[in-house]
Amino acid sequence: MEVAPVEYDADLAAKHDLALYRECVDWCDEVGVERVPDLAGRVLAPDAYEREWIDRCHRTAERLENS
């Protein structure tokens, strides 16, 4: 296994929507995706990816903005 350096970013919450990130992590937990190899066999065609993931992310971001 390779090692990747990790740095703490004190400004992370100011730069990114952590609530949306948390929802995305929850989606991964729900379907058992914890590591990159867990994505094997789950590759989608571009139109399906747009519909099933990008649109879902946009809807979730809008919902979080309005709550």
Image (cartoon, rainbow, N blue to C red):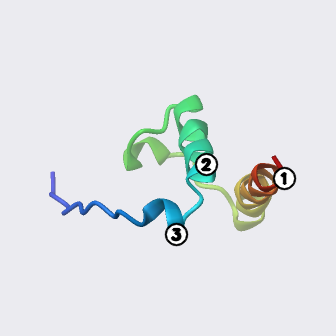
Q: Dot 2 corresponds to which residue?
A: 19
Residue 17 sits above or below residue 29 on the image: below
User: Helix, strand or loop at disc 2?
Assistant: helix
Q: Earlier in the sequence, mark 3 or mark 1?
A: 3
Q: Which is more toward the observer, 46 or 11?
A: 11
Q: Quadrant of residue 50?
A: bottom right
**Inter-mark Cα distance, 1 to 2:** 13 Å
**Inter-mark Cα distance, 3 to 1:** 19 Å
Residue type (three-letter) at the residue carrying disc 1: Asn
Q: Position of residue 8 (x, y in %)?
A: 28, 60
Query: Label for residue 54?
Result: none
Q: Are marks 1 and 2 in contact (CB under 8 Å)?
A: no
> Residue at (75%, 50%) from the top-left corner?
64
Query: Label for residue 15?
Result: 3
User: Helix, strand or loop at disc 3?
Assistant: helix
> Residue at (56%, 44%) from the top-left corner?
22
**Inter-mark Cα distance, 2 to 3:** 12 Å
Q: Quadrant of residue 61?
A: bottom right
Residue type (three-letter) at the residue carrying disc 2: Ala
Residue type (three-letter) at the residue carrying disc 3: Lys
Q: Are marks 2 and 3 in contact (CB under 8 Å)?
A: no
Q: Dot 1 corresponds to which residue?
A: 66
Disc 1: CA contacts within 10 A as few (<14), some (14-19) or many (>=20): few
User: Helix, strand or loop at disc 1?
Assistant: loop
